[in-house]
Image (spheres, helix red, strand yellow):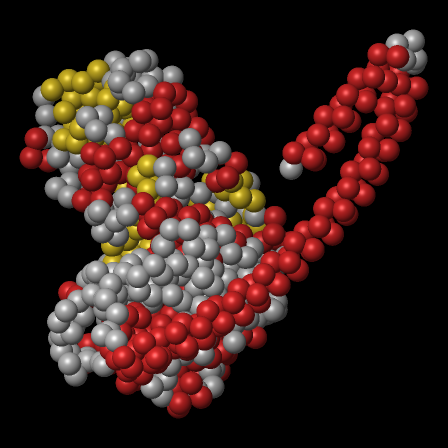
């Protein structure tokens, strides 16, 4: 089964065209059905590309509980005061009206892989010929002792955007003069590798303007982190003396919290804080586990088409996957969605399938007009999606280049959200 | 702007006047009178708006005339200078060299600055170089080696040139060579209206000449091979490739994460409806790392000639 798939996708255009005709599947009645669970950078993009490129030949249903989607990417800019919350919000209206996608606002609670149906929290099931899961992340229970979801109001994660982001911002703005903000940073792998550190930059920017004697402490279980040299240079330059990072050598990985007392115990030292931002360890969105598609915390996929290694009719995208070298980012999910969309169309309608190419770039804002980026190109091999080339901004770049990088990141935001939502 | 905000102030003033004198009116009468005043002002504003557009058109016309006159002037100045220099050169010592001159010409096989001066003749109508050189239609070229593109203070560059500069394009031997060979290969919508120097010897000579007016001899390689290896000159068969638009459409999905399908350009340039050749040449310039942008270099580095052709074909036909 798996071998067939590898041969199919791996041998390129000619073989794909030859094989595609017999692989066309007639659905039980009428058009083939694709169901997409999760309307973020992976799911919305996949739904839109399948609907757009199949020109009505495939019936696409998108299941997403929220009516307004708040992008997690750029939500740090809202914390920093650079963006309004509305800038992050997007509706699914065009996917329904311009692309004919059946948008269902409900929770997908389970998958019957034999019957090929998805069950909904609101009752009923939705049948599929191909299923695409793009559920993002959920948190590993007990990863930060003392914290669970019931504590997310006292100690927000703000690692799924929306009300949590608003809450964290309100708490930052309400900090007493000279107060303390503590971030409990997550262990690898997690969503958006530079995200926690961009957040530190944005919180520092906000505090520098409104509460310049406030302090920021990061308890970090990781030796090193994404764009570390760039962030540390920026913190020194813009927020000197404000940010203290406690790495694993100094017990940054040995943390418990007490949400009632608003204290953080870092390797035996108790810190009383005004804001505690707990970003717990992460795992694939719950539906992956419910569908039996995970191995450990993540869902393994074949990089040739993002198909699950455990079910040939289910593709999995984005943060939830274990695919290889790509970081868990909105850009990656969007890139993976296009490969999966092409593979799904090829399997269901016999359209041409080309070899997969992936890419990612993560922009981060350190201070006003001080943007940096890191990126890489990827291609799949038998084992994983592997990095083939990469770049990263350099320390000491001049102001013009940093400003251009920031402006480019705004352009990217406009581009990817148009690519997701039409 | 001052004019327009003045008009708005007088609208507010007029409404206040009506309110003051008509205190006893019913609300509806007052509203109606207010509406009349506002409508009248609106008509006035519209006509003044039309007036402004006319003036803007006239200004643009004048600017175009000015540019034409500048070109004429520069040509005349160049002719005068040549006429002045010719007899002097025959009898006198060469003029004192500018301070920035590099005494050692480096590897003599690289280029002949004397011949380069002659080749530079075709640039003089727009660019000055040497002592007292000023910006004309193009910026002066003293100290061009090592200078960031689009970054010479006080000169108004095209948006594309400014963007390339912000992306990190610096004038070094390789980048100048590529730019002189085909300006659009490096900066798609440059204001420099010049077809390019196709002859490699011409370029080497002119670069050897330009180099005398820059203080950065370390930018000059010992020999030419580095420059040759990075040329953007494309074989005719590469330019002649006809792209597979289906394949282009798939590959383009990767571009559309940043470049918008509808051609809007907020912070990231539009890439739709380019002439195919410009697109192909620009992508190869990224692939060979002559254009500076790191994301574009990464994207282009793994595209084959056929894949670049496919992308060009797809984006050219996009509505």
Give the residue drawn at x 11%, y 20%.
A269
Q: Can residue A391 be seen here? A: yes
Q: Can residue A3 be seen here? A: no
Task: Tally the numbered discs.
Answer: 0
Q: Is residue A377 left or right of residue A250?
A: right
Give the residue drawn at x 12%, y 35%.
A247
Residue at the extreme front: B91
The quadrant of the picture occupied by the C terminus of chain A is: bottom right
Residue at the extreme left: A249
Give the residue drawn at x 86%, y 24%.
B34
Q: Position of residue A325 (x, y in %)?
A: 24, 59
- Dividing the picture into quadrants, the one containing residue A123 is top right
Compare residues A141 and A359 and report the one nearer the observer.
A359
Give the residue drawn at x 81%, y 22%.
B14
Q: Is residue B313 left or right of residue A113?
A: right
Q: Is residue B301 left or right of residue A17?
A: left
Compare residues A235 and A88 and report the one nearer the observer.
A235
Q: Position of residue B76 (x, y in %)?
A: 49, 72
Above or below — where is A361 with respect to A142?
below
Compare residues A248 and A51 and report the one nearer the observer.
A248
The quadrant of the picture occupied by the N terminus of chain A is: bottom left
Q: Position of residue A83 (x, y in %)?
A: 46, 36
Compare residues A39 and A72 and report the one nearer the observer.
A72
Above or below — where is B6 with respect to B260?
above
Residue at the extreme bottom: B237
Residue at the extreme top: B24
Q: Position of residue B203 (x, y in %)?
A: 30, 80
């Amino acid at each position: 089964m798996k071998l067939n798939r590898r041969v199919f996708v791996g041998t390129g255009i000619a073989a794909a065209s030859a094989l595609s005709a017999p692989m066309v599947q007639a659905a039980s009645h009428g058009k083939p059905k694709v169901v997409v669970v999760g309307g973020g950078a992976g799911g919305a993009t996949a739904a839109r590309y399948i609907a757009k490129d199949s020109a009505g030949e495939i019936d696409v249903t998108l299941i997403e509980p929220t009516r307004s989607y708040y992008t997690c990417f750029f939500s740090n800019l809202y914390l920093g005061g650079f963006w309004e919350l509305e800038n992050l919000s997007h509706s699914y209206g065009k996917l329904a009206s311009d692309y004919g996608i059946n948008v269902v606002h409900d929770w997908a609670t389970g998958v019957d892989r034999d019957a090929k149906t998805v069950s909904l929290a609101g009752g009923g099931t939705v049948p599929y010929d191909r299923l695409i899961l793009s559920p993002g992340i959920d948190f590993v229970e007990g990863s930060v002792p003392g914290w669970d979801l019931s504590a997310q109001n006292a100690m927000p994660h703000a690692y799924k955007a929306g009300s949590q982001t608003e809450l964290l911002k309100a708490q930052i703005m309400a900090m007493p003069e000279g107060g303390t903000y503590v971030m409990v940073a997550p262990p690898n792998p997690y969503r958006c590798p530079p995200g926690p550190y961009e957040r530190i930059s944005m919180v520092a920017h906000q505090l520098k303007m409104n509460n310049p004697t406030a302090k920021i402490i990061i308890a970090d279980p990781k030796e090193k982190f994404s764009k570390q040299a760039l962030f540390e240079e920026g913190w020194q330059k813009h927020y000197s003396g404000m940010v203290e990072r406690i790495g694993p050598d100094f017990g940054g990985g040995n943390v418990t919290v007490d949400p009632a007392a608003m204290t953080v115990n870092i390797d035996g030292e108790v810190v009383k804080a005004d804001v505690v931002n707990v970003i717990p360890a992460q795992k694939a969105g719950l539906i992956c586990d419910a569908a039996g598609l995970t191995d450990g915390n993540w869902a393994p996929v074949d990089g040739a088409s993002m198909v699950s290694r455990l079910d040939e009719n289910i593709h999995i995208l984005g943060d939830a996957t274990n695919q290889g070298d790509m970081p868990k980012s909105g850009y990656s999910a969007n890139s993976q969605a296009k490969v999966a969309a092409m593979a799904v169309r090829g399997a269901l309608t016999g359209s041409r399938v080309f070899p997969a190419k992936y890419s990612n770039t993560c922009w981060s804002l350190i201070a006003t007009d001080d943007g940096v980026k890191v990126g890489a190109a990827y291609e799949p091999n038998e084992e994983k999606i592997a990095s083939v080339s990469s770049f990263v901004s350099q320390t000491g770049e001049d102001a013009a280049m940093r400003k251009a990088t920031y402006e480019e990141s705004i352009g990217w935001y406009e581009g990817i959200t148009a690519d997701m939502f039409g | 702007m001052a004019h327009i905000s003045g008009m708005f102030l007088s609208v507010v003033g007029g409404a206040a006047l009506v309110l003051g004198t008509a205190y006893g009116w019913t609300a509806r009468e007052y509203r109606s009178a207010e509406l009349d005043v506002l409508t009248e002002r609106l008509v006035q504003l519209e006509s003044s708006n039309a007036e402004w557009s006319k003036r803007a058109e006239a200004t643009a016309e004048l600017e175009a005339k000015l540019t034409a006159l500048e070109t004429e002037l520069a040509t005349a100045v160049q002719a005068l200078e040549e006429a002045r220099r010719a007899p002097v050169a025959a009898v006198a010592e060469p003029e004192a060299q500018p301070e920035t001159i590099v005494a050692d010409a480096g590897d003599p096989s690289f280029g002949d600055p004397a011949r380069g001066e002659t080749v530079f003749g075709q640039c003089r109508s727009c660019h000055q170089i040497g002592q007292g050189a000023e910006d004309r239609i193009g910026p002066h070229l003293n100290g061009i080696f090592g200078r960031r593109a689009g970054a010479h203070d006080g000169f108004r560059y095209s948006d594309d040139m400014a963007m390339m500069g912000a992306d990190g394009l610096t004038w070094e031997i390789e980048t100048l060579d590529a730019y002189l060979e085909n300006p659009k290969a490096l900066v798609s919508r440059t204001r420099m209206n010049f077809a390019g120097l196709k002859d490699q010897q011409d370029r080497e000579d002119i670069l050897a000449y330009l180099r005398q007016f820059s203080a950065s001899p370390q930018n000059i390689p010992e020999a030419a091979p580095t420059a040759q290896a990075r040329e953007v000159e494309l074989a005719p068969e590469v330019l002649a490739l006809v792209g597979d638009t289906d394949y282009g459409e798939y590959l383009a999905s990767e571009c559309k994460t940043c470049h918008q399908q509808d051609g809007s350009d907020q912070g990231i340039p539009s890439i739709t409806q380019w002439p195919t050749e410009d697109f192909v040449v620009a992508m190869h310039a990224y692939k060979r790392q002559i254009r500076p942008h790191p994301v574009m270099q990464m994207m282009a580095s793994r595209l084959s000639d056929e894949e670049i052709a496919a992308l060009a074909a797809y984006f050219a036909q996009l509505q």
